[in-house]
Structures are given as structure tokens and as C-alpha cells.
Image: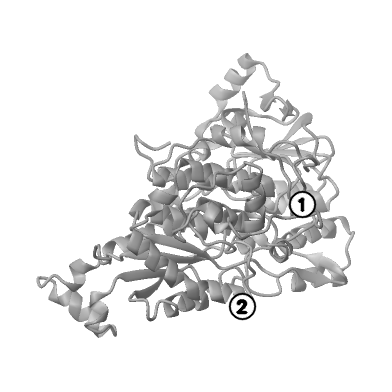
Amino acid sequence: MSLKKYSRIYTQDDSLPASQAMLIGSGLSEEDLRKPFVGVCSTGFEGNTCNMHLDELANLVKQGMQGLGLVGLRFNTIGVSDGITNGNQGMRYSLVSREIIADSIEAMAGAHNYDALACVVGCDKNMPGSLIAMARLNRPGMMVYGGTIKGGNWKGQKLNIVSCFEAYGKKLKGEISEEDYKGVIKNACPGPGACGGMYTANTMASAAEALGMSVPYTSSVPAVSQEKKDECLQAGNYLRILLEQDLKPRDIMVREAFENAMVLITVLGGSTNAVIHLLAIASAAGVKLTIDDFQAVSRKTPVLADLKPSGKYLMEDLCSMGGVPAVMKTLLQEGLIVGDLPTVTGKTIAENLQNVKPLGQEQDLLRPLSNPIKADGHIQILYGNLAPKGSVAKITGKEGLKFEGPAKVFNSEEALNEGISTGEVKEGQVVVIRYVGPKGGPGMPEMLKPTSAIMGAGLGSKVALITDGRFSGGTHGFVIGHVCPEAYDGGPLALVEDGDWITLDIATNSIHLHVDETLLQERRQRWTRPAFNAQRGVLLKYAKTVSEASSGCITDLDETSN
């Protein structure tokens, strides 16, 4: 079987001499033209710790193909830094970038007929974007994670990116000196790598490993380590195996693989962003997945890992104990995940984990099933008259299971941030942020800045927050996002007024607005849809094509999609 299933059209078709001339002109030999072409995509760019080193890693991936009969051809696509854009208008581009990344990888690999793909990625939207593209193309491919950042330190305090936002909340209250505030900022991100807790980047890297689309240990090995370099150099061997076996993403990302991923991110206490990303990846892979599937997993899966943001450990700590494979081995032994599924190594999950030791009793990062942090999952799907099509809560068990109080409504994140600083946000309130959904944002921005400021202001356990936007993996507290339908579409969230009583009940998975239906209808008749919060360009395109959060915020929705 020829391994040049796609690129042969450019290298072996006499009717395309210009194609061959350009390939030779770019430095390839006639011998190279007989080899499979592997697209090596990097989302590297300067000015962001998550992505600053990815071009170097992509070059190592390409270097590792030498002598394996493969031709690596590197190309780049974009990345948008969540950490930099959080709390400002730039965050509207974050989720949008997932689609741009997927579209551009698909366009490059499809147009140039690469036989396989290696996607070197490092930040929140890079990973789902690359997996969506690989699922669409369905030719041999693998994801290479850039790795997690090392933890920072200031005066003995362990730091990570969320420390900066929480320091800002303390600054608003006058509880931190200028020296210590600057000290946190200067030391929170000590070098390359994705945000260090079980935030969205490490959540999605772990999910990709459980899906079988990356090699074991990729999600837990630090960015600045010899192990990460070795992993990149070895990628060519696995790509060769994938080509020889004609093992494709849709062969790997089957329904049971998504269930494995959902179990792993539940046990690890991962980000709620995994909901919209896994829904989107599944849609691209032709797998039926809904938000109710996350609830089904949460009913039977406990939270076991004491990882930030709600715990005390970082991903680098887990790496020193055996990494994600040690967790997966524990879950496999307990019968919580399926082992006979293919992976990009050419082996099954169980075969990959055969010689891995599970996490033992000598550590306290991962609790035993008999003593979980929370007996069921932290990702909870809530329905009710405020969210007829569902919403997503992140409840670790430390926030309690019920919250009710009067609404305090803000029509933008900026308005809420101002409300926190002026004291409008008070103990006992259910804070509402609306018109920040996929269309209303547009781009469904994360609410990390206000939730961190609330924590820093000492209100973390004293208020709840609901929104049609989403939350960073770094968010913690009693928070509910992804409210559907969103306010921009005239969802019930658009009708809430200050003082309305709201009940949030995790035990019954309900979110209820205590306002008479007749009054709600009167409010609906007075309601006017706001104009798009974008007048042109990619944000307007996105707002006009994006599906709702409960469908994964995808932009290629058709009659067969979720």
C-alpha cells in the first residue's frame, strides 16, 4: 500500500509540472517527491508563554522524521492568548480563533494534499482547533502538546496565572501592597508553557491523551524539559506507524474515546470549556455527543484530583508523580475507562499503560475512590426556566450545592468589573452577566477577570454568578455559564431584572427564576434585540454563523450535526 495516498497527485502526475517545479524549488529532491508528505503545523507566536516555544518544538518534530522516509513540511497558523486577552475586548476573538485554526489547518492540509499531520499546539483553542481539523480531514494525524509551564514564586507563595487576577481583586480592596502586587505579576509566569493548573489548556491536553490523539505523557510533561524535546523527536516514528496502518482520527476518536475523555477530565476537575470543545470535536468526527452525556458521566464519576484552581497542586506536580498515564492506569484498574481503543501510537490505551504504575497511597494529589473530593462530577448540567436548553456549572463541592438570592444584572463584563470596584456587588446576590454569549459577545468571552476579582474581594463564597458567556479553567466559585438560549437570542436571561429571586440547585440540576410567567411575557414584549456587537470582519462572520453553546459553538452546523 502506498503511503503517499494524497500528495502523489502533486509529485507523480505528469500533468502538474508546475507543482513539482515549486516543490523542487523549495528545496526538495526527486527522492523526496517519492516520500509521504507530513504537514507539521505550529501555532507558535511570540509574546505569549503558551505558544512562544512551539516553533522550536515543531522543528524538532520535523527533525525527527529524518531517516524515516517522511518529508516534514512546516506551516503556521494563529493562536490567541486567553491569559493576555482576558478581561478586555480582545477576549471576543479567543473562541473565534478555534474556528480559524481548524479552518486554516484544514485548508492547508487539504489544498496541499498532505498525507499526514502533526499539530504542535499549546493554548486553550489551539488543541480543539487542531483536533477539529484532523477529524474533518480524517487522514493520519496526531497532536503534540507544547507542555505546561513551571509554577512561579513570590516570597514563598506559589504562583500561577490566576494569582494575577486574584491579586487584582485584593488590590481593589486595599489588601495587597504595590510591591507584592508587582511581585506577583513579575513572577507568575516564569517561562514557556501553558497555564499550570487544571485550566483549559491542561484540561484539553489531558482530554486529547484520553482520546488517543496524543502520545502518553504529552499532557503532563513540562514545556521546558528534555522529555518534551524527546517526545517531539519521537513523533515521526508514530506518524510512520499511523501511515502504515492507515489509522485515522475517526478510527481513534470513537464514542467510547470521548467517554474516556469525559471521565478523565471529571476525575481531574477540568475546565467547563471542555464541554463546548468536546462537543465540537465530536461533531467534526461524526460522533453524537450532547451536554446530557456530560451529566451522565458526572453522575457516576467522582472528582479525585486536588488540582488548581480549586485545589493546591499544579500539573508539574502531577508529572513528578507519573503524569496523566498514572491517573489513567488507576482509572483503568478501577473500570472507569475503556482500554481496548486505538491510539496514535498504534497500540491500544491498555497496551500503552501496560508498564505504567498507578498512583499509590504515598501521595495526596489523587484521592482513592473511597475518599473522593466530590462523590460525583464537578461539571453539572442545569435546566430550568432560565436555561431551557441547558447551562453548565462547575461545582467542586467546596461551594455548596444550592444558592439563592436576588439578581444583580450587568449587560457586559466591563459593567460587572466596574460594579465590583464600586461596591455594587454585595454578599448574597446572584450576579448576572448577559449579552456575552456566542452571538452576543460575540465570541462567548471568558469571565475570569470578574470571577477572580470577586475571589480577591472576599466574595467568592458569598455570591453566585450566572452568564451566557463562559468561564476560564482558572475560575472557581459558584458559577454557571453557557446559559442557553443566550440573551442575544431573546433567552430568558435577557428578561431578568435587579432584585428578581433566583434559585440555583445542583441537587436537582435546576436554575429557576421566580418571576410570574405573565410578567415575563410583558417584559418580553418590551424587549428589543441589541445590535451585533461587531460591524464587520471575522467577529461579525462568527456571530452570523455560530451555533449555540449547547451545540459546541460550531460554525459548520448542518442537518447531521448535534
Residue 559 shows in the view: yes
Measure the alpha-carbon separation of dots 1 and 2: 27 Å
Quarter where residue 20 is shown: bottom left
Closer to viewer: mark 1 or mark 2: 2
Residue at 45% x, 48% y is 253
N-terminal-most mark, 1 or 2: 2
Give the image location of residue 124, x and y in percent.
Answer: 57, 58
Q: Label 2 amino acid?
A: Gln
Q: Is residue 343 above or below residue 15?
A: above
Give the image location of residue 246, x and y in percent.
Answer: 33, 58
Quarter where residue 101 is shown: bottom left
Q: Which residue is mark 1?
A: 306
Residue at 44% x, 78% y is 64
Residue 433 shows in the view: no
Disc 2 secondary structure class: helix
Residue at 19% x, 81% y is 21
Disc 1 secondary structure class: loop
